[in-house]
Image (cartoon, grey):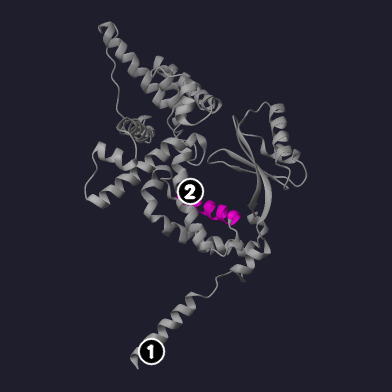
Amino acid sequence: MSDRISNASTTDDRSRARQPLVFGGIPEAEGWALAPITPRDRVHFRADQELPLEQFRSELPDGVTVSYDQGDGLYRVDGACGTAAVLADWIKAWCAGAGVTTIGLRAETDVRRRAPRDLPSDFLADLCRHYGPVSLKRLQRNMSTIRLHLPDPDDLGQQVYEWVLKAVAQYDETKSVPFGAFLATQLSKWVHDLGRNAHGRTAADTEHKQQKAIASFMAEHQRRPSEKELAAYMGQSVATLRRNSQTVATLNGLRNLQSLDGAPDATEILLPDSCEAPDEIMGEAEQTLLSHALTAACAPDPEARRDQRAGQPNVLGWATWYLTTWGGQTKTQLSSDLNTSVRNMNVYADRVENALKDRLAELAD
């Protein structure tokens, strides 16, 4: 008898678990049907300065919308299918007239998206209230990575809800994949993108691949791999592994830039008296002074929000200045090594130049 009761209880639990979720009084499947995902053409681009969005929106052709991702500085302009090329030309002309330089402009056709605002407001609000805490729980395994970029719990909470809305915009209900499963997959990708956006796609991907290879080797052999073993495991030469390891080491050092810019535990740099120091010592001192000023100029602005460009370390600007000034490389070589355009490097290097002038002026005083 007790076995039958237990089995009945288990069956009831499973039945309740399979009940469809209801948001704002609307079953989830019916809610998606009220604002189905639709195809459109899209133009992505960044700019060397923020666009006056209200003016930009007011002058867009009819039926065209624009969104701006403040975290990575990416603009997305959406129009009807078949208009991608026309939109791209229009954007280039508008930006040229406004004195704005576009970066990495790319047209894409047949992009399937929905506007979250097209869903019933109560449905969307309830859905976010449900999946926000679920997402935070799902991200616990990635928290060490997330805290590198979003140490403030309020910023993390806001980012999670932005990710939920982003998933709502991308979710294709016609593919028979539950929204919760789709969201979980996207969250893993977007956490990795935090590092890509902050430190550059090539460096972040290199670090990720090395960490995965080391973890896999340790799982198989219960010890860390030697340099030769890791190179063989990743299918690389030792020289390539060493070069990539240097990239990862630089990346990890740059993550601590903020502590070098006036934080309580910052190291004080003592320079010798110029009247007593020999020339070779002063040469080292000047190098240290310039290196410190460059590092400080690339540190995050402590007054900027973490999701703004100024709230992130200017890694690309640091690499451009350091490797062309002291590393003996040209911007063309760096462009190839870092998998980015010279124009993009110049944008970030200009930010360094402006901050560096202020830093050197302060040190001179």
Of 233 and 242, the residue lying toward us: 233
Q: Where is residue 57? Give x, y as percent.
A: 71, 41
Residue for badge 2: 190
Displayed quadrant of residue 53: top right
Q: Where is residue 178? Give x, y as percent.
A: 53, 64
Which region of the structure is painted magenta?
154-170
Residue for badge 1: 5
**Three-letter residue code for mark 1:** Ile
Outermost residue to the right = 62
Q: Which mark is residue 54?
A: none
Q: Secondary structure at mark 1?
A: helix
Outermost residue to the bottom = 1
Cα–Cα gap, marks 2 and 1: 45 Å
- The vertical placement of 297 against 216, above or below, is above
Residue 169 in magenta?
yes
Q: Secondary structure at mark 2?
A: helix
Of 335 and 126, the residue lying toward us: 335
Displayed quadrant of residue 65: top right
Visible in this render: residue 365? no
* Relative horizontal placement of residue 197, taking residue 268 as reference (left or right): right
- Quarter of the rendering occupied by the N terminus: bottom left
Q: Where is residue 241? Give x, y as percent.
A: 33, 34
User: Which residue is pictured at 38% across the width and 43% down the height?
Assistant: 208
